[in-house]
Image: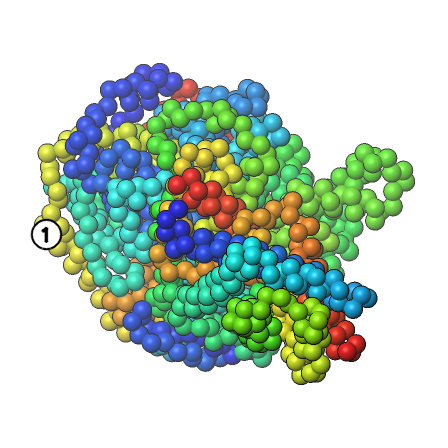
Amino acid sequence: MSGILNSSIARKFAMALSAFFLMFFLLQHFVINVTSIFPNNGATFNKLSHFMGTNALIQYALQPVLIFGVVFHFVMGFVLEIKNNNARAIKYAKNNGAANSTWMSRNMIWTGMAILAFIVLHFIDFWFPEINTKFIQGDWSGMHDGQLRYFHELQEKFVNPARVGAYIVAFVFLALHLLHGFDSAFQSVGANNKYTKGLKTFGKLYAILIPLGFIVIALFHHFNH
Amino acid sequence: MALDSKVPEGPIKDKWTTYKDKINLVNPANKRHIDVIVVGTGLAGGSASATLAELGYNVKAFAYQDSPRRAHSIAAQGGINAAKNYQGDGDSNYRLFYDTVKGGDYRSREANVYRLAEVSANIIDQCVAQGVPFARDYGGLLDNRSFGGVLVSRTFYAKGQTGQQLLLGAYSAMNRQIARGKIEMFNRHEMLDVVIVDGKARGIIARDLVTGEIERHSAHAVVIASGGYGNIYFLSTNAMGSNATAAWKIHKKGAYFANPCYTQIHPTCIPRSGDYQSKLTLMSESLRNDGRIWVPKNLEDVKAIREGRKKPTDLSEDERDYYLERRYPAFGNLVPRDVASRAAKERCDAGYGVNATGEAVYLDFASAITRYGIEQAKIHNISNPSDAKIYELGQKIVEEKYGNLFQMYEKIVDENPYKTPMMIYPAVHYTMGGVWVDYNLMTTIPGCYCIGEANFSDHGANRLGASALMQGLADGYFVLPYTIGDYLANDIRTGKISTDLPEFEAAEKEVSDRINFFINNKGTKSVDYFHKKLGNIMWNKCGMSRNAKNLEEAIKEIAELRAEFWKEVSVPGGDKEFNEELAKAGRVADFLELGELFAKDALNRNESCGGHFREESAEESGPQKGEAKRDDKNYAYVAAWEYKGEPANAVLHKEELKFNDIELKQRSYK
Amino acid sequence: MNLTLKIWRQKDSKSKGQMVDYKVTDISEHMSFLEMMDVLNEQLVNTGEEPVAFDHDCREGICGMCSMYINGEAHGPDRGVTTCQLHMRMFKDGDTITIEPFRAKAFPVIKDLVVDRSSFERIQQAGGFISVNTSGNTQDANAIPISKHAADEAMDAAACIGCGACVATCKNSSAMLFVGAKVSQYALLPQGQVEAADRVLNMVAQMDAEGFGNCTNTGACEIECPKGISLENIARMNREYLSASLKG
């Protein structure tokens, strides 16, 4: 097993594994966010958020893994992009990529970078304040003005139409990234034969519905504040 | 020098086994001190290189392409024969032997052909072990199909790419030896001469086709496996680079060249569409199982079709001439290749050719489609099916059987062969003639061997379908590796051959001089100009049917063309670089000599046999009138030519053919 | 028809190349693309210029020697064909056609449109074979039955002609379709099992050492492959590789 990450297929496999993890995380994130539009004024959302934000296992075990997964996926993505670019020193004068592949598959690096930019924004919006409150100020109560603060914070963020716009754009990029990424991850781990045709349809649905759902949630909060 | 075929004594069934038991061997420790050069890495050369390397010899292999996998063996479609009798239909070594000798019109050496049949089964075992994905039936066992001219199913196949898969098998065996360091592979190298030291072949001069460097390579034996010379016709189904240079160079240094006039012209090729045409494409002969061949009965209709005023489908049955069915009621469209080709030429020469060039006949699937359609309607219990339904059902069956060929045709010709008849015309496909070899596959130069299509050996005057692959692999895997040991056993104390010997220097100088001539000659005509002209002469005068007058003219015209070539040829670029025109110039120069010998051989052989049809030697009366007439009394021999400075001065040596195990008969297809 | 050709000219592997414009006239739509190139070259030879060097041999789509990148696609705009089978009827009078060599770091240009694909050779030498000697007493070909399904799938993988279009067309210059096809052929056959693990590890290691890029599953190779080799072969290679790695 040593040195396995030096081989092309192993890198591909590692990219796919981190992708699976991130896709699972995304699904989980989505499920929790959906509860914010439940007609109980954020009660479920607050409960779940507080659990996620204060559970030791999640905070000290899964959160670092997630961060590692995100960083790994991005770093490896860039490393592969650079290596792949170097594999063709002189570029074609005329290249008709659209003839044989989708725009999404050829531009993963760009959709990925857009998502990275979004994550930075997202961290500034939510994660850094959260870290500040909990780890620097030491406030693990999750309370503000006598009630759980999460739902209120969420609503605050979606007041600004510019931010909502940025989120929507980012989710479109996420959808584009997933439209290729989902199938690609399965292909990379070797799941492509006549029995996996259904996966492709599922992948398309996942890639469109999840980002669309996030967009709906953002708009919901923007217009229902 | 008298020709000694060195065929061992004894009954034909035991010759090879007994011979192998008594042959000299080289001990494993000594093999590593012996070098063998193999020129050409198709089925024969590739399999020989791999096997010799497995045995422990140091092999240097040469290919003009960028990989052994590109050799033209790869283009063989149909299959490979082997007397496995897996179908239990009565096949045996003797039957394969008999069919091959008869198919070759009794002009091959019995002992060689029997050996070929004997090792044929081993080839299939070997290839399966190498991972060749032959077609299988639902029980997981190997499938067979039957091929023209025989009564059993003995042809193994891998889709329509049997040649490709067999070549890739041999290539993989080579790769294993290259990785072990036992084969040194020289891709993009062309052999330009053989080096003879003390009467023995001891090396070659080769040109690196990328850098243009001339290199000397020494060895204890040289094996030529460079394929056939069909490209002498300019247009053939051979690859663009296929050439006779290696074979011709050894001929000029002492190897006799046998039966150059035996050429196979394949009846089902896609016709030429214009003068720019660079090569011809073959379609599997299996098409004749269901296609009916015809031309219009009236010249008026021919004219109308050529001018586009009429379509072939406009002609009623009465207006069509199914000439093969008319002339050969018994075999009809399934007559052997040579007969079908000549009949097409006869019609086209009479003015009935159906395309703009006047060289095409129709191959029509309409009646097969209808026949299958009616059959299918019955199977599916459709009563009173409409014509359109019948057509639809029938087309499906034809598509299953020949879909890939129809698609290929449509890509090239841009006509839908389900809707309108295909056009076909014969094209040069294979050369049975080649370097003369004895039972050991050694040429008349000691230490110089010749295998595969490059030699003359096993197919006589006509080759049966699916036998070329068999012969190439038999020579390379199972014959040469034994027989070469017998010769090399005397070389265990020779030590490395120095490339500084004066013989190498002289050969290299000869090669360099010729290259310098081409580069510096201030001619006005391109190499292709001469090649096309030569091709025209060959096709018109040494083609499907030959006569003394034409052959005499051909000899004269080729000699004149050759003289003009050496004066007027123009080769751009330099010698120390990648220069395809330069490589072509050398090859065409050799074709220009071989062509003359070809015509001379054809003139000498005043009989019709197999692919060689002399108009003077046809049946004059009776039911066989106009058909080929063999002359066993005067021509049951191999014509082996010795080089004497000019093709015109070549000296004929005869190897008499004795038939002890087969009775000589006239072929009849009426 | 009359055409403008923009062709990559490069004297040798060390020189710098550039695109050069040529004109050809009276091209028949029935010509193959390479016959059109022959017309150009005849024209160049007759005017004393050096003809354009390009690889070609069988001209019937099976040897895998021809290798041009035509108007931004490997083997040109038609599907399921090599350059030699591409016909001029795919183009229109007055078209400008851009012709470049297959480009990849692992396929250095030798001259003009000719590239060096010996990297493919070295990958095959690293394990693209079954170690069996020629003895004449190999076990009978029918001794091990192979299901028709497996034999057909192996044949589909084995149909690769090694032309390199997959590499040329891949945005990453990856050779995984080529390697995957060979690994698959043997992985599907019982004869290939004994060496399966070593084969895939060694061939992939060689592929990486040659400087091919990594596969990002765009699927372009499958579309441009003249023999329609399926992406499933890459997936199979991935599986084979992972299980071989885990075996150690």
Which residue is painted at 38% across and 65% down in the image?
A: C105
Query: Would residue A15 be found to the left or right of residue B433 on screen?
Result: right
Asked whether residue B640 is in view, the answer is: no
Label 1 Cα crowd, 10 Å radius (few <14 / some 14-19 / many 20+): few
Q: How is the image coloured?
A: rainbow
In this rendered view, identify the residue nearer to me: B262 or A113: A113
Which element is circle 1 on?
A: loop
Image quadrant holding the N terminus of chain B, namely top left
**Residue drawn at (27%, 59%) of the image:** B208
Quarter of the figure with residue A159: bottom right
**Res C191 → quadrant:** top left
Towards the viewer: A41 or A109? A41
Residue B527 image offset from top left, x and y in percent: 36, 65
Image location of residue B129, percent across then percent down? 43, 32
Residue position for label 1: B500
Amino acid on which the number 1 mark rests in the picture: Asp
Quick one: A104 or B336, which is closer to the camera?
A104
Q: Is residue C79 above or below residue B665?
A: below
Residue in the picture at 22% in, 43% down = B254
Where is residue C145 drawn, in percent x and y? 54, 27
Left or right position of B200 against B335: left
Q: Quadrant of the C terminus of chain B?
A: top right
